[in-house]
Structures are given as C-alpha cells and as structure tokens.
Amino acid sequence: MAVTLADVAARAGVSSATVSRVLNGNYPVAGSTRERVQRAVEELDYVVNGQARALAAATSDLVGVLVNDVADPFFGLIASALQSEIGVGGGQPDAGKLAVVCNTGGSPEAELTYLTLLERQRAAGVVLTGGAVEDDAHTAAVATRLARLARSGTRIVLCGRPPLPAGSGPEAATIAFDNRGGARRLTEHLISLGHRRIGYVTGPQGRSTTRHRLEGHRAALAARGLGPQTRAGAHAEQLIVHGGYDRGAGYDATLELLRRDDGITAIAAANDTVALGVCAALRDSGLRIPEDVSVAGFDDLPFGVDASPALTTVRIPLQDAGARAGRLVLGRVAPPPGGVATVATELMVRGSTAPPGGSR
Amino acid sequence: MAVTLADVAARAGVSSATVSRVLNGNYPVAGSTRERVQRAVEELDYVVNGQARALAAATSDLVGVLVNDVADPFFGLIASALQSEIGVGGGQPDAGKLAVVCNTGGSPEAELTYLTLLERQRAAGVVLTGGAVEDDAHTAAVATRLARLARSGTRIVLCGRPPLPAGSGPEAATIAFDNRGGARRLTEHLISLGHRRIGYVTGPQGRSTTRHRLEGHRAALAARGLGPQTRAGAHAEQLIVHGGYDRGAGYDATLELLRRDDGITAIAAANDTVALGVCAALRDSGLRIPEDVSVAGFDDLPFGVDASPALTTVRIPLQDAGARAGRLVLGRVAPPPGGVATVATELMVRGSTAPPGGSR
DNA sequence: GATCCCGCAGAAAGCGCTTGCTAAAGATCA
DNA sequence: TGATCTTTAGCAAGCGCTTTCTGCGGGATC
C-alpha cells in the first residue's frame, strides 16, 4: 500500500541502504546518487515510517508532556512554549519532535496510565508539569515509572513541580516555581496595605502547589507578627477555605468566607481563575473591589489584566519555564546544578488591591 | 536492555507467540498458560514496545489533534473533551489512544509539517480544529496530505472548521460550527436593542472563522435594512476593523474605532478574548459598559461570565463537539449524513449589552 | 607496476512484535 | 478402535527501517 524504502530504492536504482543514508545524511553518498534518490523520493511522495525507523534505530521522536488541565491557560502557556521549542519551528535542523500533550485532569491514575503509554512508545522524553499529587503511594508509583523510563533512556523533566524525593531513583531535571515565596510576598503586600482580616482560598487539597502557596501565605502572616498565636493570626486561620482551581471554587469559597466574617477586607486566591470566581461572588454580594474587599490571584494569566479592576497577582514566567523545559528534555542544555532550578516569581500589583477603607 | 517479549516467553516457558496472544487476548489460550504468562509479565515489569507492535500489526494508537493555539481555552476545551473521550479514562476497554495535541500557532507551514510528522507515525486519526487558513495553495496542500493519510487508513475529522472543498479527495467527517448564524443573531440582538453605530472587530485575516463571523454580522445588518446601500449600513462598514484573536487586537481596534466614530454605541468582537481587550480599551477611555458602549464576544469561554459586566456572547458547545470529534476519529460512531454536522450556536445575553442611552 | 587506502555502495542481520500456518494432543463420534 | 474434530501452542515469515561489515574500483604512493 504505502510507499516503502524499497520502492524508492528500486526507482532510484540503488539499494535501500543507500536511500536510508541519503535520508539521514549520516553517511557519505556521492552527489549524483543522492540526487537520484531525492528525485525518487519526491516522485513517489515517500514518507518514512516512523515506527519502523524507531524500532530499527531504537529512538523515538515523541516527547510526552503531562498536564493537569489542557483547558487551563496555565498549562497551555507552558505547553505552547515547550512545543515550539522542541517541535516544528523550534529552529531545529530536523523536522522536530512531536510533543504529546497528555491531559491527566489531575487524576493520579491517568498520570500513571499515560506514563505507561509513553513507556510503550519509548518516548524520547517526558515532562511533568504543574503541581504533584501529594500521596506517598502515588509518589512512589510515579518514581518507579520514571525510574524505568529513565533507565531506558527517556529524559525526564519536571516543570512547575517540586523535585522528586532525593534518592528515589530517577534523575530528573527540575524547574521549580517559587510558589511559597510568591504567595508570601503577596500576603505581605496585603498586610502592608493594612489588611488584617484576610481570607484565603486554596487550590485542590493534596496538591503540592496548593500546599506551597498556602505555606507562603502563612509565613507572611507569621513574619508580620500575625502568627496563629495572635488574635488576628488565629482569625486568619479561620479564613482559610479549601477550594480548587476552578472559578466555581472561588465563588463558593467566597460566599463561605463572607459567612464566616462579613467584615473581611481582602481575599487571596490560589490562582487567577479562582480569583475571578471570588470577584464574581463579591460583586453578587454587592461588594466593591477593591474599596470593600481587595482580591489577589496567582499566576498572572493573560486574562487577569482584563478583569475589572485588573487583578493583583503573582507572575510566573510560564513561557520561559516551558521553553527551558523543552531544551532540557532534548538535552540541548545541561541540567541546572543540583538538578533543580527555581524560577523566581514576581508580585504584580494592580487595581484589585488597595488599603481597606470600605464604608460598610 | 529493556525487557522483551522473548524474555517473558522464556520465563513463562512458552513461545513468544503465546505471550503476544495473552497480551492481546485475541486468540484462545489455556487458562493455566495465561496465568503463567501474566505472572511473568508482572515479575519482569514488561511493557510492550509500541513501535514494534505498530510495525508488525500496521496499526497505531496515536491520534493527532491540530490546534491553532493551545494556550487558548477555545482549543483547550475541545482538546480536553476529545482526549478524555479517546484516551485514558474514556471508558474504553483498551488503555486508550494517545492524543497528540499539535500547536500550529496558526501557521500554515507548521500545519503541513505536523501532518507530515503524523503521517510518519502512521497516526490512527487526525483531527483538525478551528478556523482554516483560506489560501488556495494551502488548502490544496492540506487536502493532498489528508488524502494521502486517508488512503493509508488514517481517519480524518474536522472540528470547528468548514468542510473540505467537495471532490478534493479525502473523506473527512466534519463538525462545523454555525459561526455565521451565531454572529448574525448576535448583531441582530444589538440592532434590536436599538444600536445603529456598531463596531466590529474581526479575527485574523484569511481565516475561515473570521470570514464566517463577519458575514453573519453583515447579514444581520442587511436583514434589518441596514445594508451597505443605506446610510447607517455604509457607516457600519466603516466600523469594521481587522484584528486578531488576542486581547491586544481588541484593545487596539477599539481605540481605532473610537477614533473613527466616538459616538459608537456597541462593539462586537471576533471572540471573547478580543472582547476583553475591547472592554479594557473602553474603560481606559473612560467609557462605561454597557451604559456608554455595549460589548459582545463569541465562543462563551468560561471567563466571559466573570468579566464585569458579564459578557454577552455566542455559545458554542465546544466540549460536546470535541467529544464527538473523538468518537468520530475512532470510528466509534458513524459519520453524519453527508459527512457534515453543523452544531448550533446559542446567543447568551448577559450584562455587557443594553440599549444605547449613553449620556456622553 | 605493485601496494595501499579511500570513498562509496550493497548484502544482510537484526529491532520486537504479530499472525498464518502447522502440528500435537485430547475429545468426540460412529 | 480408528477417524475426525477441537483446542492450544509453536514455527517462522515478515512489518520497514538502520547499520555493521564486506567489497569494489581507482587515485595516490613508492
């Protein structure tokens, strides 16, 4: 059915070995022969069979990218930068690798299944992005899978996810985000504006990102003398509501927060999407932003500046991180010393936060 | 290095053929033998080599999904639904196919390159999503590639993209969006609110989606007696500004619109993202929404309801469409009669549109 | 003119799996 | 009891490519 190497060889009057060499350009072939072969390739519309090549050469041009939610621009931005770095148009000589974006939906089972699928394909590399599920059994299962992948030559990169526990086996270059530091600076910003009754809507439970951001929030409170032993600090603990990474979580959590303390003056959300939900709930409750309640997000996704007022948030250089992950997974750059690079996050102060001064 | 079928066979004391049959379950194997094999597989942590399997069986479990922009939730929603339909967790007996999300960035060259890459991988299916680049040469090139893919057994599905020109070769099941109808209803809504000076910000030029939506807008004007021969209609033509699908395009286009007519009372945008840019520009110009200017988007992406005021827009059932595309590309459902299914779009009236009545 | 080497092409051995065909048992039947 | 099915397992031939090794012709070397 399909055109094979042998067909091309026959047409060009050479052996299939020669055709292969012309195609790969890794062996001297006389100019005239090369031309003849190239002509035959074009005339027959020949396209190599990736599977056969991969099997014979024991290489693959698939790179797996696991994301928690493709529909979330957080991952979209990482994936897009990564893909353009390693794939088509990455300024690479060869046609590029194929990035397989796998949507786990945050499910541990799906994560494992995808890793198996990628192992089957003998993927050249695997990039795990975003927060990890914090469950010992699952972490161990992932580490096992990754170790096996690494042993068979697959390069592993973590992007926006904490490094694997030391000694757990596989070597994985890690690009970690400073979630803790960013969250801390954000809450410090709120405190220094004068807020004391600060609500916090977390991400989904059992996710590393959720934990780190919450830790940063608490660290800021403690550092400003609002530790849980103080009155205001204890109150702040009451104002932590567990949510998720979707807008509905922010909406519901906000109603809950208002129930717990209707004199709340600021709400920090786990990410920008959640923050939009927070804003919506506040507006629906007849509260103004930032006059009555300040709101802050995290990630600095593009839509944040279009909220009204524009969202104060913490910027993570997602595109840079994605591109870097791409270079790492191809082995085009050396892994950072120690295997872990932490990218800094930056506080972006915009209109959604202001000193408390509501007239309620 | 890696564990092979032969290793498992040796351990289980059977031939590799038997192991293969146990794994695929497509041939009778005695219970005791099966058990022995399964034990060996587990003990050795065996994972089949996808390439070898694909080569031998002439099948593949890769499905390519081409999108114009992964970071855009429009595509994210489609891809996510599609992937969960065909892949892990799709409720399928087998472990599922791997959806390869390829980000073309709207570039025709990248689109072709990805099609070649997928052809190399002998993909089981290819889904092209979103607006097509309208250029005869490119359309022909794509059709050629698709025809070749189809001939070698790859199933082709178009989702949110107009059907291929009839007789151009490949059979492709198409899920088209009623962009024209949606846009028309949207503009009719604006007109019936009383607007006459309506701006329109288009998507990128030369894209089918852009054209269809604009045609809908013009059709609405014409149907309401505001054809280009009328005074108001001619004016409306002046108020069409070409843009793109990003927020910046909306922002800039709005400033341009205000320059052309500072008495404009409504602006329809090519999509929701653009609409947010429009809102931002209006606010920065000191105009209120919807009192001074009504704004409408398209697509009904999740963040639209969080804009303030919530965005009037046209809903496209992206998730349904993506899931359906997934079923089609697997051949789990029959293609629609005629090969083309058009999904309806629905006008979602929210707070960002109101009768004109600004006090400027 | 004999020797050596270099540049280039082909033969062929796999890569790890699937599958058609064959064959050895045991089951069934007359 | 011999003949005929059924099961169930193995043999071996590929799938389409890469790559090692072998070999051939001719210019350089002495």
Image (spheres, coloured by chain):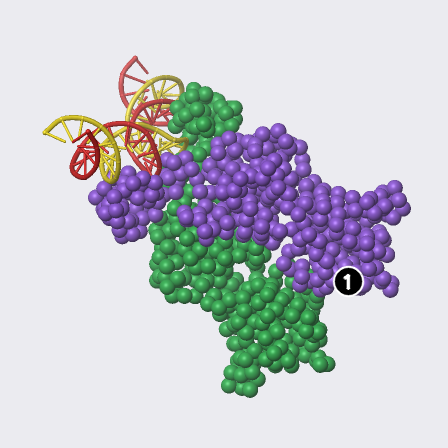
Chain colours: A purple, B green, C yellow, D red
**Which of the 4 image quarters holds residue B304?**
bottom right
Residue with the most extreme right position: A231
**Where residue B307 appears, x then y in whole percent?**
68, 64
Near-viewer residue (A207 or B296): A207
Q: In the rendered image of this protein, does residue A250 appear above or below residue B293?
A: above
Q: Determine the secondary structure under disc 1.
A: loop
Relative placement, left or right, of B251 versus A266 is left
Near-viewer residue (B266 or D13): B266
Task: Look at the image and tell me in which quarter the C terminus of chain B lies.
Answer: bottom right
**Which of the 4 image quarters holds residue A292?**
bottom right
**Which of the 4 image quarters holds residue A143?**
top right
**Where residue A302 appears, x then y in whole percent?**
63, 58
Residue A122 visible in this rendered orientation of the protein: yes
* Residue indicated by mark 1: A289
Q: For mark 1, does the 10 Å Cα neighbourhood hold few (<14), some (14 to 19), or many (20 or more) residues?
A: many
Q: Residue at x 55, y 44 (%)?
A: A325
**Where residue A355 appears, x then y in whole percent?**
82, 60
Task: Look at the image and tell me in which quarter the N terminus of chain B lies.
Answer: top left
Q: Which chain is indicated by disc 1?
A: A
Q: Residue at x 85, y 52 (%)?
A: A196
Q: Residue at x 71, y 74 (%)?
A: B286
